[in-house]
Image (cartoon, rainbow, N blue to C red):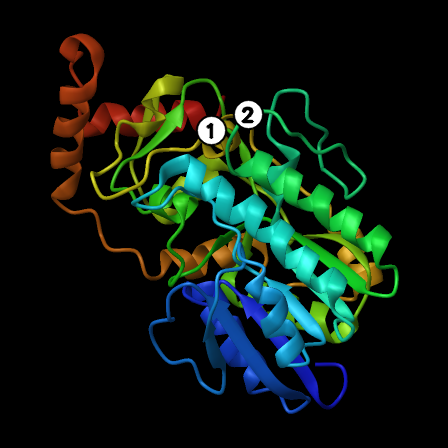
Amino acid sequence: MASAGRVVLVTGVSRDLGRRFARAAAAHPNVERVIGVDVVPPRGDIGGMSFVRADIRNPVIAKVIAKEDVDTVVHLSIISTPGSSGGRSMMKELNVIGTMQLLAACQKSATVRHLVVKSTAHVYGASNRDPAMFTETSETRRAGGGYAKDVAEIEGYVRGFARRRPDVCVTTLRCANVIGPKVDSPITSYLRLPVIPRRIGFDPRLQFLHESDLYAALGHAVRAETSGTFNVAGNGVMPLSQVVRRLRRPTMPVPSFGLGLLRPAHVAPVSPELRALLTYGRGIDTTRTREVLGFEPTYSTAAALDDFASDLVPTGGRIDEMLAAVEERLPGRTPVPDIASIGRSTEELGHG
């Protein structure tokens, strides 16, 4: 988007993030063409984007890049949860093997001059040994076997690509948890629960990025052509106790294993990354993003949360149903406290 005639290839367009960004990029006056690639066609309005059915795990992606004279690649097909089929092994293959093949194709290309990768702040992990705020120079973690480990590996491959192709501008965006009325993700599913479970004795600090700011950050990264890794998040952090009060949701104090007890059947299990975040929290410093990349989100963490809350469905009678479901799942069928006691527990935790 920095000069006329840009040809942009966007991966992962079957999901809303990729489709919406590709559609917005195609409407930009300085973009000649946008090619969206994925194994299945996107649903909804694709605007001026041209869709190509291609699997980035297959070397054929190099032929797509060469044929279309692509100069900018925006990699968005990194998934955070296992799909309905394939499970964790398929998720890792899509994330890690797919990225390796895409980078191999970019390395061979004579036309690619800019690569933008959407990463995540989950790469820092979450523990009781964390700094107050993570900077881009903070150590990342490969522990565990889930999404965070995939992203740590992906970033390693991206750094290797940058060393091999110093002529290509490589921009990595480590984004905080994205929320908004249209976002469907593990964190938004958790915050939409009629009763929000909170781990006893912990009040983690959370930081959010509004969905519109995510699209803006990606577009800015493409236009700015600034190499490096950048933390992207709304200004400010909020303790979970304050988050649930702003959402006007009742909460239930639970032990560690109880974070998944209030999960409806259609909601994915709480991942290790989300469980750690909801225990210890995390904050990321965005100074470098403002001063070097030149981008600052429109929404603060609080404003992003308020916009998300504006579209929440009132809990109503669903609370009793959810609590009954929890009682069924608890070991020994421990009685679940009534709503009044939950409210008292919330206030006690909020001031702990």
Location of mark 2 (residue) = 144
Q: Nearer the viewer, mark 1 or mark 2?
A: 2
- Secondary structure category for the residue under label 1: helix
Farthest top residue in view:
332
- Single out the residue that lies furthest toward the right: 166
Say which residue appears at 88% left-offset and 59% top-offset: 166
Q: Is residue 125 visible?
A: yes
Image mark for residue 173: none
Residue visible at 49% across and 82% down in the picture:
49
Pick whichever, 263 or 206, lies toward us: 263
Q: Is residue 299 above or below residue 47?
A: above
Q: Amino acid at mark 1?
A: Pro
**First of labels 1, 2 by sequence position:** 2
The residue beneath circle 1 is 272
179 left or right, relative to 221: left
Residue 282 x %, y %: 61, 35
Q: Residue at x 15, y 15 (%)?
A: 335
C-alpha gap between disc 1 and disc 2: 8 Å
Q: Position of residue 102 (x, y in %)?
A: 63, 58
Secondary structure of the residue carrying tag 2 is loop
Position of 149 relative to 21 (above/below): above
Front-lying residue, 248 or 232: 232
Circles 1, 2 touching at the beta carbon (< 8 Å): yes
Q: Which of the 4 image quarters holds residue 298? A: bottom right
Amino acid type, label 2: Gly
For residue 283, say whether it is visible: no
Q: Quadrant of residue 60?
A: bottom right
Query: x, y (%) of residue 141?
Result: 67, 30
For label 2, the crowd category at 10 Å Cα-Cα, with few meaning under 14, some 14 to 19 and many 20 or more, is: few
For image coordinates 52% across by 32% down, the residue present is 277
Q: Quadrant of residue 256?
A: top left
